[in-house]
Image (spheres, grey):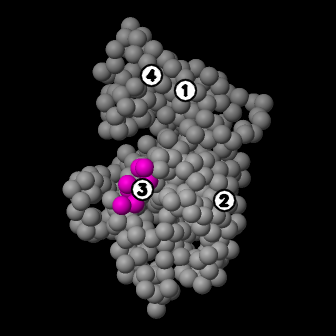
């Protein structure tokens, strides 16, 4: 759950879309106490919406902090301390703020376990968090073990752990989506439906998740974001033609996607700085070595900005296929063209450049290639 919470926190504060104009806004007050804080210590509140600046409240003499403001609808926020920004072991507290009073009590070192009182949406949120916490306890040890193995270059031993981790991910998503379907009028349902489909490749599943929401919730911030995913998949989804592009290799040689016509090709979006990408690379290497002589290749598209780091990662991870990048990071036009909002991400194309699968990870990549490259 740690990786999930941190990733959505980073992703959502980077949004720069336009907000729908609403005239009716409700006033809210949030008061809280976190043991372990000191007088004058800053506590931050970040609305997980518009890339707005974080609001700050200083801890008072009695140990309390207070936030006030207005919202047009129940709004997801994160409460965090300076330590939570600096140490990944401390997870920000995610909750919903809506009109009225909300209280928070807990410990600053275990903020995600704080007690939140106030608001119907927070009651709904707790149901989802119970599922998240169950799988966090299962997935965290696997994630920690994979990191140790990766750091010690025991990449072969990572694969069975990764397979188990991905199995838990799928089970967690199934339970979350079932709960969202059972609560179609909850803003929390839209929030989690978006989170668990933010890098989805299955248009039917995303459309179903959106259709399961009540009409008013479909018009909420996260309801609209979910619809945006569905709309993007209609353009770059399975069965569509892969958009053409040209990028340069580390040696500044331009490469066109069209030059791969006649081959099955996996367009692999990654970056040297992306931990999950680097952990996934052993699986990609395995697939490449197994099928490279069966009219299959890989085109790595990096979202790096540092050319030296990009080249070093290619060599260190033994990525022996062709690599290209514009070295613009998340400003990559090709990433935008393919609707890539999280990495690792990949697109499997047939010999005519049609997308036949997306976001194949772990053994799913080998399984799919075995089906099409008989």
Q: Which residue is mark 2?
A: 337
Residue at 53% x, 31% y is: 46
Crowding at label 1, few (<14), some or many (≥20) Cα neighbours within 10 Å?
A: some
Above or below residue 31? Residue 139 is: below
Residue 326 at x, y percent in the picture: 58, 54
Marks 4 and 3, how far apart in space? Answer: 40 Å
Q: Depth check: 260 or 149 in front?
A: 260
Q: Viewed as shown, does residue 172 lie left or right of 199?
A: left
Above or below residue 311? Residue 53 is: above
Residue 215 at x, y percent in the picture: 71, 53
The secondary element bearing badge 4 is classed as strand
Crowding at label 3, few (<14), some or many (≥20) Cα neighbours within 10 Å?
A: some
Residue 350: name its quadrant.
bottom right
Residue contact between numbered discs 2 and 4, judged by CB atoms under 8 Å: no
Mark nearer the viewer, 2 or 4: 2
Q: Which residue is mark 4?
A: 43
Pick whichever of labels 4 and 3 is earlier in the sequence: 4
The secondary element bearing badge 1 is classed as loop
Pick whichever of labels 1 and 2 is earlier in the sequence: 1
Q: Which residue is mark 3?
A: 311
Residue at 31% x, 38% y is: 89
Residue 316 at x, y percent in the picture: 33, 59
Q: Which residue is mark 1?
A: 54
Residue at 25% x, 68% y is: 156
Marks 1 and 2, how far apart in space? Answer: 30 Å
The stretch drawn in magenta includes residue 314: yes
Crowding at label 4, few (<14), some or many (≥20) Cα neighbours within 10 Å?
A: many
Mark nearer the viewer, 1 or 2: 2
């Amino acid at each position: 759950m740690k990786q999930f919470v941190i990733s959505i926190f980073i992703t959502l504060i980077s949004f720069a879309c336009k907000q729908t104009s609403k005239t009716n806004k409700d006033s809210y007050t949030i008061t809280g106490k976190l043991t372990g804080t000191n007088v004058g210590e800053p506590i931050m509140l970040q609305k997980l919406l518009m890339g707005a600046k974080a609001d700050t409240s200083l801890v008072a003499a009695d140990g309390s902090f207070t936030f006030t403001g207005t919202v047009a609808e129940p709004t997801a926020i994160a409460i965090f301390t300076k330590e939570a920004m600096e140490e990944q072991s401390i997870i920000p507290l995610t909750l919903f703020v809506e009109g009225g009073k909300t209280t928070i009590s807990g410990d600053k070192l275990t903020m995600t376990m704080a007690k939140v009182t106030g608001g119907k949406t927070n009651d709904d949120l707790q149901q989802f968090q119970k599922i998240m916490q169950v799988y966090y306890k299962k997935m965290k040890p696997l994630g920690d073990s994979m990191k140790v193995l990766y750091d010690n270059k025991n990449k072969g031993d990572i694969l069975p752990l990764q397979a188990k981790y991905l199995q838990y991910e799928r089970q967690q998503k199934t339970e979350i989506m079932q709960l969202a379907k059972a609560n179609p009028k909850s803003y929390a349902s839209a929030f989690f439906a978006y989170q668990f489909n933010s890098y989805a490749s299955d248009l039917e599943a995303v459309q179903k998740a959106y259709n399961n929401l009540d009409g008013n919730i479909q018009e909420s911030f996260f309801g609209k974001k979910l619809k945006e995913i569905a709309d993007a998949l209609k353009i770059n989804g399975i069965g569509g033609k892969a958009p053409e592009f040209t990028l340069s290799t580390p040696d500044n040689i331009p490469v066109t996607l069209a030059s791969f016509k006649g081959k099955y090709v996996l367009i692999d979006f990654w970056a040297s700085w992306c931990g999950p990408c680097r952990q996934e690379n052993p699986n990609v290497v395995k697939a490449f070595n197994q099928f490279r002589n069966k009219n299959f290749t890989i085109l790595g598209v990096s979202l790096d900005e540092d050319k030296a780091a990009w080249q070093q990662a290619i060599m260190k991870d033994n990525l022996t296929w062709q690599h290209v990048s514009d070295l613009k990071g998340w400003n990559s036009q090709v990433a935008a063209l393919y609707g890539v909002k999280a990495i690792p991400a990949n697109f499997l194309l047939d010999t005519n450049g049609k997308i036949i699968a997306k976001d194949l990870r772990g053994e799913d990549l080998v399984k799919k290639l075995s089906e099409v490259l008989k």
